[in-house]
Amino acid sequence: MTNKVGLAIRELHRAENDLAAELLQVSSRHKSDHEIFYLGRDLARWSQNHVRELAKHGKNYEVDLDAEAHDEPSLLATVRQKGAELIGGLHDPSLLLLKDLREIHRKAAGVSLDWEVLAQTAQALKDTELLTLTKTCHPQTLRQLRWANASLKANAAQIMVTP
Amino acid sequence: MGEIDRIAEPWGTRAAYGPGEFWPVRVDVRLDDGVRPADVDEWVQSATILHSNGDGLDIAVKDGRIVGVRGRADDRVNHGRLGPKDLFGYQANNSADRLTTPLVRRDGELVETDWDTAMAAVAGRTRELLAERGPSSVGFYTTGQLFLEEYYTLALIARGGIGTNHLDGNTRLCTATAAAALKETFACDGQPGSYTDVDHADVIALYGHNMAETQTVLWTRILDRLAGPNPPKILCVDPRRTPVAAAATIHLAPKPGTNVALMNAILHEIIANEWVDRDYVDRHTIGYDELAKQVADCDPEWAAAICDVPPGDIRDAARLLGTAERLLSTVLQGFYQSHQATAAAVQVNNVNLLRGMLGRPGCGILQMNGQPTAENTRECGADGDLPGFRNWANEDQVADLAKVWNVDPTQIPHYSEPTHLMQMLRYVEDGSIRFLYVSGTNPAVSLPELARVRKLLSQERLFLVVQDIFLSETAELADVVLPAATWGEKTGTFTNADRTVHLSEKAVEPPGTARADLDIFLDYARRLELTDKDGEPLVKWTDAEGAFEAWKECSAGRPCDYSGLSYEKLRGGSGIQWPCNAEHPDGTERIYTNGEFWSEPSYCESYGKDLVTGAPLDPVEYEAMNPSGKAVLKAAEYLELHEPPTSEYPYLLTTGRTLYHFHTRTKTGRVRQLQNAAPEVWVEMSPYDAELQGWDEGDLLRISTSRGSVRARLRISGIRPATLFLPFHYGYWDAPDERSARAANELTATDWDPCSKQPLFKCAAARVERIGVGNAPSPAPTTTASKPVVAGVSPTRGGTDAVVLEHFPAKGDER
């Protein structure tokens, strides 16, 4: 029998890492939008914690995962943040913010569904440890998702309507 | 009757009283030198304007000039007392450098002009932008220092007339978190407590609230209780040894930015020791299980490691709160302007809810304001709210507002929360806002990261209008400057932090051609030809009383109900607390009695937000969560600081205020008694750090963050180690040396609380170096939190220049 649970954990580990990286990149790219900058970093930390926890639980299902979450290389962060400051005085590039928030939303939605699968699996297997993990982590994913939606909603009108 | 130096003795003479007793009257009087009470032509009713306490006073007028002030003995707020800023601050009205004529920028210089030219330019540029770029290119930034009638008129012009979502007040810097914390817990703004709770409480907890300096008269009330029989116990949470800390039973001095960790540990103890009023919690709240789960692991040892406070002290504090019989909690900038502002302030609400201590004498919450009329900015929708605490996300409530204004509901932007100031500045930065109308505030000194603010406000493409009483640092950047009348020169009402409404009558004429802010707004509306949906003028009033009557209609049936008030009713009285309507004709001392709230889904002002991300709940979620309108116990996890100390910037810098000044000193800096008491910026450091560095009192230091540097003389004070304090009052209009920076906000970061959107002024990583050895002590006051720890600093005195009369009525004569 193939290790389906291990695969699911591996896939979620990858998706959380990807979401963390996306949040950090978007944060840096929009340094002039201070709330995006700081919240992006705060919320990336949640995903990084999830990566660590998943690596720990992966051992129960014989998958060996890196507990060290991806981080934004400092050189790239600097380049992105400098770029953000350079275009901070322009309105048109703010369209990029909508695109980036959409991407965060899409990735967080994927992660959320992965947690849903894992929670169902944990219940069927009566793995209380894994179930507890999903109950801790999944609500944070939903908060990341809502944040992306709310930020998009708060910014869309000004970006779209004002020349 | 006694004479007293009220610079040296800011809180005056004690009048001790016991729990449940009447706070004795003490009438404070200050008149210009050489003016005797018999010389005064007329006493004109008003209230205080240089803080949020709302003390009733009378303005003394002689020969058409303000010559003094006297506390109103029968006022419910102050029982005759006044603070030093009020006793001397009136003199600022008479300053020789008041703005008296409009100014316009011509060839880069501000030059005098007439009103018609100035207003034609302001209205003309607005109309151009509306035609070319739409209403979202126009923004308004007002204050917490105008009158109710002015805010309501401005809100109508901006939201109902122009149709922009970009209107906010500088209340964003002072009281946004107070409003946000109340909205999170009670789903609606509105101060639960009353100042009279001080008369009854057996424990008073002050969280980040240096009441002794921000609200001197309310602190006097507490001092009088402390001097009487069965005094209350005081809990103080503050990184500095403030006068409150000195009077406290327990003083916790947490590391800046760690308030949520501290509060969670206190809640942990209250739950673990079963000090919870389960009956109250079960009947009147939701969310207990989530809160209990959130704080389950937050024991005092956990918090101690984060906050750098001894775990035993946290236990003692929790026991004090957990065993109180009548608990009054107050909160101010130490929480509101710090990391996780709303989350921390909400945990204070949770303490009172868990203990079932709300809506009874002595059992209250005071989420405080910083400015005299901030409450009105919030009520009238001149900040990030709609008028009458209407919910922008509730279509029915927006439709109701549209009906009051006789406009189409789509005219009032409500597709997202009204734009907060820091976001408006971002739109100024990216050029999508091109017109900014600033009234009664000085962002070029009071906002964070001043180099950025100056750059944004100086942009060629931005049309900046500044309406003020002096040529402030912001006015100097303006395209048009409009000279305004101030307190004492115009009539209107305003409401303090415990919902007390006062009438402030016009006592004298404004200087030169200066005009009341209301008259300027009305002129602006006329020139824009704003109309309602029947083509009639949108703004239907022409004076303050007319605006007040219109506001009564707008507020009727809402929590902040003014429908039972009138100028006539307020005249001669002692201040009346809203809601005041047919049901409560004499006003309402405490709201939320019997565990009833304004949180019912169709009535509430807010559905709440995620305390960490700021994402709002939608109506369906809220209705499912709180269908029967209970109070919400909202939990929050502690998050690390956004800018933790590093080896390069090893200190945490907090900024704040002193007793003798208000805001950017536009008024208090022009009053010699106040200016002499605190003449120049200083920096505070602990004795431990000073000794480690080998620095002495009075040494000249350079304080830097990644955003800039300022110079200030060292005061070695009772502040906690590894922490620096700078007062934020000092800008550049009267700087002795123009080349050296001294405004604390050169250093602060552009970062804000995701929930309340209040900027964080109290947790920046900083470094400090000595650039000169001092030959005299630092100029900081010795009577306040900046009290020196070393001997040999001469005490702050006002001398004969600061003599105030205190009059205690004869016994039996005082009610």
Image (cartoon, helix red, strand yellow):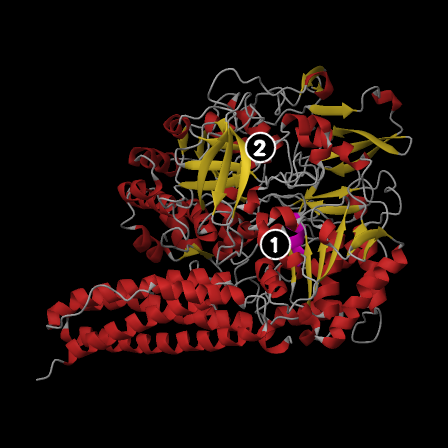
Q: Nearer the viewer, residue B215 or B797?
A: B797
Residue at image mark 2: B213
- Location of residue B223 by image quarter: top right
Task: Find the magenta span and give its range.
Answer: B374-381
User: What chain does mark 1 sit on?
Assistant: B
What is the magenta segment's predominant secondary structure?
helix
SS type, badge 2: helix
- Where does residue B679 sit, x and y in percent of width and height? 64, 29
Q: Which residue: 55% across, 33% down?
A: B712
In the drawing, what numbered circle is on residue B453?
1
Label 1 neighbour load within 10 Å: few <14, some 14-19, many 20+: many
Does the magenta portion include B379?
Answer: yes
Q: Amino acid at mark 1?
A: Val
In this rendering, the answer to whether B503 lies above or below B426 is above
- Location of residue B323 by image quarter: top left
Q: Which residue: 66% across, 57% down?
A: B457
Does the magenta portion include B15?
Answer: no
Q: Nearer the viewer, residue B84 or B800?
A: B800
Q: Amino acid at mark 2?
A: Glu
Label 2 neighbour load within 10 Å: few <14, some 14-19, many 20+: many
Looking at the figure, which quarter contains the C terminus of chain A? bottom right
Q: How many numbered dots are placed on residues in this image?
A: 2
- Where does residue B747 sit, x and y in percent of width and height? 52, 46
SS type, badge 1: helix
Query: Horizontal placement of B55 versus B366: left or right?
Result: right
Looking at the figure, which quarter contains the N terminus of chain A? bottom left
Q: Going from the N terminus, do you reach mark 1 or mark 2 first?
A: 2
